[in-house]
Image (tube, rainbow, N blue to C red):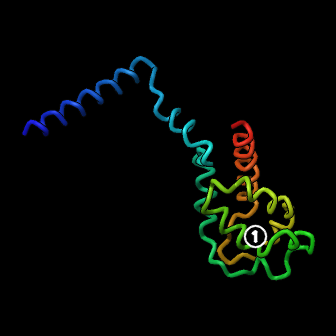
């Protein structure tokens, strides 16, 4: 019973501290979280960016995007472009590594691949997101 009372008091005290910090404009929880995990590649996404990632997760791994639709110079840097789309929709911390793959595919090619994609993966939007967040991630890792 004493342990339960002690736990309740500790939780109440913590709640009061959080509420007081918010009221005084000193809340830093989210900021500290972002600072702590930025080096691990966990960048925050806007609602629009989350929608892009969610839509890209619709990839059914059919491989149509790898069947000769890419120019030879783009294929040279990628074992399979489908893997690039799949990985980019699932692993934000690897966006800086994906920059090279996406730099080999221009937007006109991505538009053509999107048109052929049965799952309608938003490849151009995903490429823009990877380029933006990958650059941001690479810069933050350099700063460490």
Judge left or right: residue 115 versus residue 120: right
> Above or below — where is 105 with respect to 26?
below
Task: Estimate the x, y position of residue 78 in percent, counting from the top left.
Answer: 81, 71
Displayed quadrant of residue 61: bottom right
The residue sitting at the top extreme is: 24
Displayed quadrant of residue 11: top left
- Front-most of residues 37 and 48: 37
- Front-most of residues 26 and 23: 26
> Above or below — where is 64 with respect to 45?
below
Q: Residue at x 72, y 67 (%)?
A: 84
Task: Estimate the x, y position of residue 80 in percent, counting from the top left.
Answer: 77, 75
Please identify the quadrant where the N terminus is shown. top left
Q: Residue at x 72, y 80 (%)?
A: 63
Displayed quadrant of residue 105: bottom right
Judge left or right: residue 95 versus residue 111: left
- Front-most of residues 67 and 36: 36
Task: Estimate the x, y position of residue 116 in percent, counting from the top left.
Answer: 76, 77
Please identify the quadrant where the C terminus is shown. top right
Classed neighbour count for the residue bearing mark 1: other residues with Cα under 10 Å, few (<14), some (14–19), many (≥20): some
- Front-most of residues 132 and 117: 132
Q: Residue at x 62, y 49 (%)?
A: 48
Q: Residue at x 25, y 27 (%)?
A: 13
Judge left or right: residue 68 versus residue 32: right
Task: Estimate the x, y position of residue 68 in percent, counting from the top left.
Answer: 85, 81
Residue at the disc numbered 1: 114
Report the number of numbered marks.
1
> Above or below — where is 52 with respect to 121?
above
Badge 1 marks a residue whose secondary structure is helix
> Above or below — where is 57 with respect to 35?
below
């Amino acid at each position: 019973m004493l342990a339960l009372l002690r736990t309740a008091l500790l939780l109440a005290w913590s709640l009061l501290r959080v509420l007081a910090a918010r009221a005084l404009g000193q809340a830093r929880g989210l900021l500290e979280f972002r600072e702590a995990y930025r080096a691990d590649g966990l960048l925050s996404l806007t609602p629009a960016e989350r929608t892009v990632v969610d839509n890209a997760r619709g990839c059914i791994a059919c491989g149509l995007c790898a069947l000769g639709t890419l120019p030879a110079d783009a294929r040279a840097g990628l074992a399979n472009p489908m893997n690039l789309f799949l990985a980019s929709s699932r692993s934000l911390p690897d966006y800086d590594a994906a920059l090279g793959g996406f730099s080999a595919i221009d937007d006109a090619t991505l538009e053509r691949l999107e048109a052929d994609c049965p799952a309608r993966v938003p490849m151009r939007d995903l490429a823009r997101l990877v380029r933006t967040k990958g650059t941001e991630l690479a810069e933050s890792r350099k700063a460490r």
